[in-house]
Image: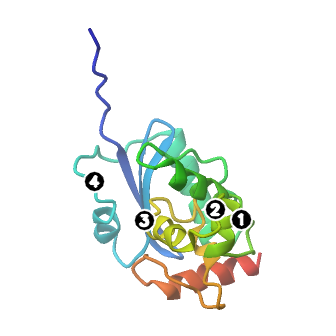
């Protein structure tokens, strides 16, 4: 007989930053989703696209992540490499791309093709673009550091799109 383990709904937080409103959802010490760049808190929360959540509650994880996001948005050096993210929804290829993207240093960029090569699939630049487009953890998984091979920024799925991507890259260049 197997026992079904019911997971509690994730908790959510919405914070105002210099980069706009950021919302995130977490369960225990694992990030479930993050949105950024919204002009109002409700839009940021709605963009999490969660069917069921608990109200914001105090937790060390949320407090720490909030402080780190605030510092990053204020132009301070901040590293999100140790923030644990939920990867249950990812295929092995997607997981490989996310892990390699996470290794791109602040102030540097890679092309979609370079990231595909580092992920073990040199001919999968377009597929890498799709992984970046569906990234649930912008900033934590720094998809803004992945650009087109022709020197253009490529795409960015945050509400202000390429404007925010350029702002993030400029912010990191100044650090």
Q: Which mark is residue 119?
A: none
Instruction: Tell me how far mark 2 sits from mark 4, CA to CA.
Output: 25 Å
Assess disc 1: are there few (<14), some (14-19) or many (≥20) residues with their C-alpha within 10 Å of its C-alpha: some
Query: Mark 2 or mark 3: which comes first in sequence?
Result: 2
The reply to whether discs 1 and 2 touch (Cβ–Cβ < 8 Å) is yes
Q: How many marks?
A: 4
Residue underneath mark 1: 104
Residue underneath mark 4: 50
Farthest left residue in view: 51
Provide the secondary structure element on which disc 3 rests.
loop
Provide the secondary structure element on which disc 4 rests.
loop
Q: Which mark is residue 134?
A: 3
Assess disc 3: are there few (<14), some (14-19) or many (≥20) residues with their C-alpha within 10 Å of its C-alpha: few
In the rendered image, which quarter is residue 141 located in? bottom right
Instruction: Tell me how far mark 2 sits from mark 3, CA to CA.
Output: 13 Å
Provide the secondary structure element on which disc 2 rests.
helix
Farthest front residue in view: 123
Relative to residue 59, is residue 39 depicted above or below? Answer: below
Assess disc 2: are there few (<14), some (14-19) or many (≥20) residues with their C-alpha within 10 Å of its C-alpha: many
Assess disc 4: are there few (<14), some (14-19) or many (≥20) residues with their C-alpha within 10 Å of its C-alpha: some
Instruction: Tell me how far mark 1 sits from mark 3, CA to CA.
Output: 18 Å
Between 21 and 89, which is closer to the camera in this rendering? 89
Q: Is residue 44 left or right of residue 93?
A: left
């Amino acid at each position: 007989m197997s026992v079904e383990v019911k997971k509690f709904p994730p908790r959510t937080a919405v914070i105002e930053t210099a980069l706009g409103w950021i919302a995130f959802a977490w369960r225990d010490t694992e990030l479930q989703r993050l949105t950024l760049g919204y002009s109002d808190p409700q839009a940021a929360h709605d963009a999490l696209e969660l069917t069921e959540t608990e109200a914001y509650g105090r937790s060390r994880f949320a407090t720490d992540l909030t402080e780190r996001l605030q510092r990053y948005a204020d132009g301070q050096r901040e590293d999100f490499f140790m923030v644990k993210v939920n990867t249950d929804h990812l295929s092995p290829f997607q997981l490989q791309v996310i892990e390699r993207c996470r290794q791109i240093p602040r102030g540097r960029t890679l092309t979609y093709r370079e990231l595909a090569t580092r992920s073990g699939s040199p001919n999968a630049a377009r597929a890498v673009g799709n992984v970046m487009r569906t990234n649930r953890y912008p900033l934590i998984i720094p998809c803004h550091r992945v650009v087109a091979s022709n020197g253009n920024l490529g795409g960015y799925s945050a509400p202000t799109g390429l404007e925010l991507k350029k702002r993030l890259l400029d912010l990191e260049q100044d650090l």
